[in-house]
Image: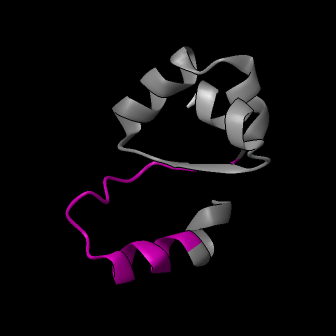
Amino acid sequence: IERLIRASKVKELIVVAPPRTLADLRLAFHPDVKACILAEINKDLTKHPVSEIEKHLIGDDLFH
């Protein structure tokens, strides 16, 4: 993710992961990655269809 952020000049990133994984990611992310994180959603959405994932990303979950 660090290389991707630097190469594409990503300005904002939303991280979606189950709670335990999200905690591990927080520890592992480079400061450049952390600086781009706009929001974190602590949910496992891997088995959800794209339409449901979109609802989570544009709904109230983004700001909780």
Residue 48 horizontal side relative to residue 9, left or right: left
**Residue situated in front as seen by the camera: 27 or 11:** 11
Q: Position of residue 7 (x, y in %)?
A: 69, 34
What residue do we see at 56% from left, 25% from top?
26
Residue 54 horizontal/vertical position (percent)? 47, 77
Residue 6 placement: quadrant: top right
Does residue 54 show up magenta in the picture? yes
Left or right: 12, with 43 as reference point: right
Quarter of the N terminus within the rendering:
top right
Quadrant of the snapshot with the C terminus: bottom right
Residue 63 appears at what percent x and percent y?
A: 68, 63
Compared with residue 44, is residue 34 higher up or lower down, i.e. above or below?
A: above
Q: Which residue range is magenta in the image?
A: 38-57
Residue furthest out toward the front: 7
51 relative to 40 in the view: left or right: left
The residue drawn where x is 65% and y is 17% is 30
Q: Is residue 27 above or below residue 10?
A: above
**Percent x, y for residue 52?**
36, 79
Q: In which quarter of the image is residue 53?
A: bottom left
Within the magenta stretch, is there residue 43? yes
Q: Is residue 1 above or below residue 24?
A: below
